[in-house]
Every structure is written in structure tokens, then in C-alpha cells.
């Protein structure tokens, strides 16, 4: 049974009983084919804000609070009319400065959204005085896409961050680099964070051909 302190929430949080998970319980998306379907769900509907939310989130490993606070000035230079090579921000949770490279997929998704921008925030709501969408709205966007493409498991906002880590690990990223990206002090924390399964371990064993 959960300790009562774990059930406390603020008005800015996604309702924990509705989201059905805490950040630590959210799962990465491990199936690359499903991940591609998940990412392209909103693109096919021309809902480019929601599409960019998923693409940027999955490629930067931002926490949802940092992702939603992004402004166009963080990624786009009006004078040169070009996208920046990096984002630099101060993490809300840790107060640390993070510098993150923007890859081609991120820039492509943002380029689709750029002509439709509403105010200074990238992931703005549709109100007259445009502000960032709420965490619960971001959760609904992600859950709708996951449901539409048949993604099971505990998929939520934090899944984007964990999906980045999972595929970075699969691609051979060094543990020390993942620890730095996630601000973890031990690899044991990172290992749990990545959601490594027995299938992942089997792949390592079965892929070994030493002689």
C-alpha cells in the first residue's frame, strides 16, 4: 500500500490516480515500429503542435515541465531565420544548466509548426492569451496517440524521456553519458530507469558470436 505522502498532489500535476503511474513507473516505448506509428499519429492529422511535442520530447529527454516551458526564442533565431544548433536551459527540478543538441528530426518537426506558432511558447494552448498547454493536456495528447496505435503498458509524459534513454542505450551510449543526461548518481538508478527487459538481455546473449 502506498504511503499517504506519495498521494499528495499539486494543482499543476497530472492527477496521479488518472495517469495511473508515477514518473518512476512510466515505461519507455521499446518497439521501434510502434514508436514510429506513435510519433507520426498527429503528423498524419496535421496536428503539428502535438506531433512536435512527441518528437522533441523523445529526442531531448526533457522532463515534461521543461518541455512545456520551451519558447521559440530557445530554438529559433529570428534575425537569421534559422534554427539553433543547441538548446540551453535551466532545469526546473535540479537548477542545472543543460545544453542539448537539436537533431534533424527535431528541427523538421519544429519547422512544420513554425508557421502556425501562437505567441512565444512552442507548445501553446488555443486560448487568446496563449500559454503553454498544461501537463494534463500533454498527458492526454500522449495517451490518445498511444491508444490509437495500440501501445499497451504505462505510457505517459515521462515515457518520452525514458524512450530516449532506452534507444540511446540500445545504440551503445556509454552508461556514464546516460547518467549525465539524466542527472543520475549511480548506474543502478539508470538501469531501472531504462526498463531493461529479459528480451533485451536475451538479445545480447543470442547476438554473441565470438568464434
Image (cartoon, rainbow, N blue to C red):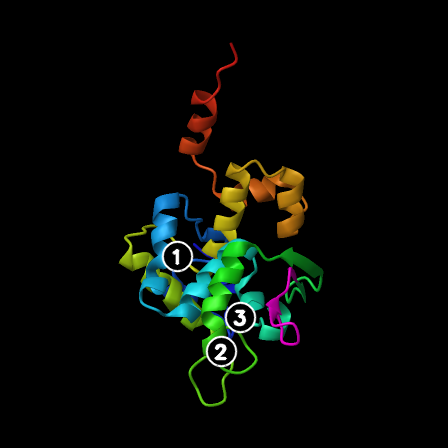
Spatial separation of the CA atoms under disc 3 and disc 2: 14 Å
How crowded pointer 3 is (Cα within 10 Å; few <14, some 14-19, many 20+) is rated as: many
Find out whether the residues at labels 3 and 2 contact each other: C-beta distance under 8 Å.
no
- Which residue: 48% across, 16% down? 209
Spatial separation of the CA atoms under disc 2 and disc 1: 20 Å
**Where, quadrant-wise, is the N terminus in this rendering?**
bottom left
Q: Which residue is mark 1?
A: 39
Q: Is residue 141 above or below residue 61?
A: below
Instruction: Using residue 149 as the reference point, say whether residue 208 is left or right of it.
Output: right
Mark on residue 122? Answer: none
Spatial separation of the CA atoms under disc 3 and disc 1: 17 Å
Give the number of the mark in front: 3 or 2: 2
Give the residues drawn in magenta, as a range.
76-86
Mark 1 or mark 2, which is nearer the start of the sequence? 1
Q: 44 and 123: which one is in front?
A: 44
Residue 50 location (% of width, % of height) = 41, 68
Q: Which residue is mark 3?
A: 68
Q: Residue furthest front?
A: 80
Q: Which residue is mark 2?
A: 117
Mark 2 or mark 3, which is nearer the start of the sequence? 3
Query: The residue tagged with tag 2: helix, strand or loop?
Result: loop
Query: The residue tagged with tag 1: helix, strand or loop?
Result: helix
Mark 1 or mark 3, which is nearer the start of the sequence? 1
Residue 109 location (% of width, % of height) = 47, 63
Query: The residue tagged with tag 3: helix, strand or loop?
Result: helix
Amino acid at each position: 500500500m502506498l504511503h499517504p505522502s506519495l498521494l499528495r498532489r499539486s494543482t499543476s500535476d497530472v492527477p496521479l490516480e488518472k495517469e495511473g503511474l508515477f514518473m518512476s513507473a512510466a515505461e519507455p516505448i521499446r518497439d521501434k515500429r510502434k514508436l514510429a506509428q506513435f510519433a507520426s499519429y498527429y503528423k498524419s492529422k496535421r496536428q503539428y503542435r502535438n506531433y512536435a511535442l512527441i518528437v522533441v520530447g523523445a529526442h531531448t529527454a526533457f522532463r515534461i515541465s521543461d518541455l512545456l516551458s520551451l519558447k521559440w526564442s530557445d530554438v529559433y533565431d529570428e534575425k537569421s531565420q534559422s534554427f539553433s544548433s543547441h538548446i540551453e536551459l535551466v532545469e526546473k527540478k535540479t537548477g542545472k544548466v543543460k545544453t542539448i543538441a537539436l537533431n534533424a528530426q527535431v528541427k523538421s518537426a519544429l519547422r512544420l509548426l513554425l508557421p502556425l506558432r501562437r505567441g512565444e511558447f512552442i507548445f501553446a494552448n488555443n486560448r487568446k492569451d496563449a500559454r503553454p498547454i498544461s501537463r494534463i493536456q500533454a498527458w492526454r495528447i500522449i495517451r490518445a496517440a498511444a491508444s490509437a496505435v495500440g501501445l499497451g503498458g504505462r505510457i505517459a509524459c515521462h515515457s518520452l524521456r525514458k524512450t530516449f534513454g532506452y534507444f540511446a542505450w540500445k545504440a551503445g551510449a556509454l552508461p556514464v553519458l546516460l547518467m549525465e543526461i539524466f542527472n543520475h548518481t549511480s548506474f543502478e538508478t539508470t538501469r531501472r530507469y531504462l526498463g531493461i527487459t529479459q528480451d533485451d538481455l536475451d538479445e545480447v546473449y543470442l547476438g554473441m558470436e565470438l568464434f
